[in-house]
Image (spheres, rainbow, N blue to C red):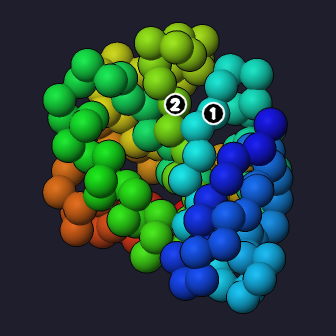
Amino acid sequence: MAETINCPDCGVRNRLPTVSSGRPRCGKCQTDLPWLSNATTADFDQTIATASMPVLVDLWAPWCGPCRAVAPALEELARTRAGFLRVVKVNVDEEPTVSGRLGVQGIPTMVLYHQGIEVGRQVGALPAAKIGQWVDTAMASA
């Protein structure tokens, strides 16, 4: 499976496989691409295991107000940390196996992975700046 990401600099559409390692760059201008994607039960483990950069997993549901409030902050984080952070969204209603396996009891829950290992977990919504600080703190202790 692949997702299409528009380059923020030149606007070219780039196809990125859901499960991939490396650092996504625009095929035309070589700009780092913001990597925001969705994961399913079928590809979640491989997405985390093959990532060459930290992965921030957002466990959310469409009916959850705080989840919808956090979404723009995560999109911005994916843009500002393009090439250094991947954001993966998991809809807990569509993928209950993933949330159950991770022990998620409340949403939004954000789980940060580095080299396939969980290095941080945040339950509940945070303002955009606080999410970035949380990622930085978790990565510093990893």
Q: Is residue 122 left or right of residue 21?
A: left
Q: Residue at x 62, y 59 (%)?
A: 5
Along the line of sight, the residue nearer the viewer: 30 or 96: 30
Q: Quadrant of residue 74?
A: bottom left
Q: In the rendered view, would you say 1 is above or below 15?
A: above
Q: Could you say which is closer to the camera, residue 58 or residue 11?
A: 11
Tag shown at residue 4 = none
What residue is drawn where x is 63% and y is 33%?
39
Q: Give the amino acid at mark 2.
A: Val
Can you tell which quarter of the image residue 86 is in?
bottom right
Element carrying mark 1: loop
| Cβ atoms under marks 1 and 2 closer than 8 Å | yes
Q: Amino acid at mark 1?
A: Ala
Residue 101 visible in the shown view: yes
Q: What's the mark number on residue 39?
A: 1
Please tell me which residue lies in front, 80 or 130: 80
SS under mark 2: strand
- 44, above or below 131, in the image: above
Mark 1 or 2, nearer chain start:
1
- The relative height of residue 64 versus residue 55 in the rendered view (above or below) is above
Of residues 84 and 122, the one nearer the viewer is: 84
Mark 2, other Cα within 10 Å: few <14 / some 14–19 / many ≥20: many
Q: Which of the 4 quarters of the picture holds residue 46?
A: top right
Relative image position of residue 119 (x, y in whole percent): 53, 52
Q: Which residue is mark 2?
A: 90
Residue drawn 23% across the image and 62% down it: 128
